[in-house]
Amino acid sequence: MGQRNLVPRQRIHFHRQDGSRAAANSGAPACLIAFGAHNVERLRTSGIEGYLLTNWEAQFPAIKSALKWEADRFQSMFKWSDAA
């Protein structure tokens, strides 16, 4: 995980090479990740509305636990067997 993560309030919209905006947004939430003090400061002062996460594990232990549970559940769905 990066030093700081910014979760924008709104979904990202893509633009074509001519600058026109695409009809649909990204379809899923985005996360901008900064590495290094300079990039963290750029993210902090970017003006992008959203949530700047500074210490994920300390601030969100319940979410971390839920994500681990989901990952374990997903992996259990795909148990491989070497038996022929």
Image (spheres, rainbow, N blue to C red):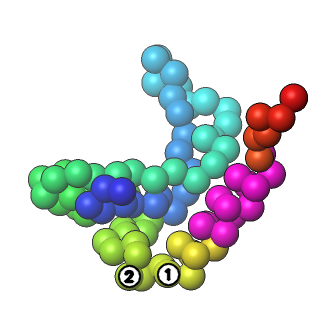
Residue bearing the label numbered 2: 58
Compared across the picture, whether 58 is left or right of 26 comes to left
Q: Are marks 1 and 2 in contact (CB under 8 Å)?
A: yes
Query: Observer-nearest residue: 60 or 12?
Result: 60
Q: Residue at x 36, y 68 (%)?
A: 52
Residue 84 position within the rendered picture, expressed as x and y whole percent measured from the top left: 87, 29
Q: Secondary structure at mark 1?
A: helix
Q: Is residue 38 above or below residue 22?
A: below
Which segment did they paint magenta?
67-78
Tag 2: amino acid: Ala
**Which of the 4 quarters of the picture holds residue 68?**
bottom right
Compared across the picture, whether 54 is left or right of 24 comes to left
Task: Calculate the distance from the C-alpha at mark 1 to the C-alpha at mark 2.
Answer: 6 Å
* Residue 11 appearing in the image: yes
Compared across the picture, whether 78 is left or right of 72 comes to right
Q: Residue at x 53, y 45 (%)?
A: 12
Binning the other alpha carbons within 10 Å of mark 1 as few (below 14), some (14 to 19) or many (20 upward) gives few
Q: Is residue 18 above or below residue 63?
A: above
Residue found at the very far right of the displayed protein: 84
Residue 10 position within the rendered picture, expressed as x and y whole percent measured from the top left: 55, 57
Q: Residue at x 46, y 53 (%)?
A: 31
Tag 1: amino acid: Pro
* Residue 46 appearing in the image: no
Disc ID at residue 61: 1
Q: Secondary structure at mark 2?
A: helix
**Which of the 4 quarters of the picture holds residue 54?**
bottom left
